[in-house]
Image (cartoon, rainbow, N blue to C red):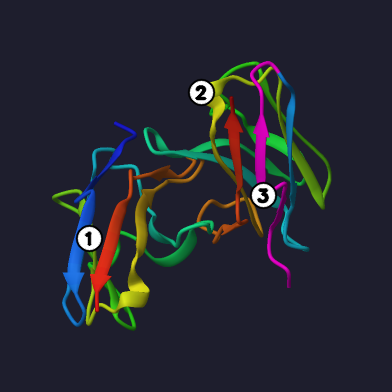
């Protein structure tokens, strides 16, 4: 019940396209959902995060969509660029609970 | 700010040897986290400290693993004795405050290979 499922495992998108990564969780106590971006040889870095009191959060080309009833949330990358090529991790937590990370999605944006 | 500093960046050792990984958190941050990343298990939280005190070590896989934070600017993760299945990238992260909502800043990681 503490797991966060993430799909797809890998994703190839053409430059300018939309990248969509999906995550699902079971524990309804989760109340904080960050996305981390990791480039090869680097540590993960916070990209964007959402609380369940809103259904969408947008920061530049990155948008989180949150569906509380379905216990799903997704990351949308608009106008994907080769520089977005990285591994993306969704995560979830609640007060007193450590982050639970999804297994990651390796995104490749072709020029 | 130099960010979170980890050393060494790469470590190759033989099974049975002691391994010590080091971390210097961002100045002013009072929470420190140790993670392990593998292809099979993804990113796992091993232990985290707040104000130099271990808060939760439930992620530490075995007694062979130990972590200390003697002061606010230094932490170690020790594996003794090391085994090939400990091969992974170990990340240290720091944040300000205990709340897990606070952004965690990750170091570059230490790639450990146990032969």
Q: Nearer the viewer, residue A85 or A78?
A: A85
* Residue bearing the label numbered 2: B85
Tell me whether the residue at label 1 lies in contact with that at label 3, contact meaning CB atoms closer than 8 angstroms. no
Numbered range of the magenta stretch: B1-16
**Subunit ID for the residue under disc 2:** B
- Marks 1 and 2 share the same chain: no
Q: Residue at x 30, y 56 (%)?
A: A106
Label at residue A74: 1
Give the quarter of the image for residue B25. bottom right
Q: Label 2 to label 3, Cα distance in Å?
A: 19 Å
* Residue bearing the label numbered 3: B9
Q: Is residue A80 above or below residue A25?
A: below
Left or right of A67 on screen, residue A1: right
**Subunit ID for the residue under disc 3:** B
Q: Label 1 to label 2, Cα distance in Å?
A: 33 Å
Q: Residue at x 74, y 23 (%)?
A: B18
Membership of A33 in magenta stretch: no
Q: Nearer the viewer, residue A109 or B13?
A: B13
In primary-sequence order, the first of circles 2 and 3 is: 3
Q: Position of residue B22 (x, y in %)?
A: 75, 43
């Amino acid at each position: 019940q503490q797991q966060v499922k993430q799909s797809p495992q890998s994703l190839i998108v053409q430059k300018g396209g939309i990248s969509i990564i999906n995550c699902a969780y079971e524990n309804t106590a989760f109340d904080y959902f960050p996305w981390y971006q990791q480039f090869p040889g680097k540590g993960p870095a916070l990209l964007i995060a959402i609380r369940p009191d809103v259904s969408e959060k947008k920061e530049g080309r990155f948008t989180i969509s949150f569906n509380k009833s379905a216990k799903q949330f997704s990351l949308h990358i608009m106008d994907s660029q080769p520089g977005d090529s990285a591994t993306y991790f969704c995560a979830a937590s609640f007060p007193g609970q450590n982050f639970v990370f999804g297994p990651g999605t390796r995104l490749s944006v072709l020029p | 700010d130099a960010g979170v500093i980890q050393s060494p960046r790469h470590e190759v050792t033989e099974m049975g040897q002691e391994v010590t990984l080091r971390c210097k958190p961002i100045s002013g941050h009072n929470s420190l986290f140790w993670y392990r990343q593998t292809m099979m298990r993804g990113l796992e939280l091993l232990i985290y400290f707040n104000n130099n005190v271990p808060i939760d070590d439930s992620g530490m896989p075995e007694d062979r693993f130990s972590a200390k934070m003697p002061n606010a600017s230094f932490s170690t993760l020790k594996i003794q004795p090391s085994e090939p299945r400990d091969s992974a990238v170990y990340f240290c992260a720091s944040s300000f405050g205990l709340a897990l909502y606070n952004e965690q800043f990750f170091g570059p990681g230490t790639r450990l290979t146990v032969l």
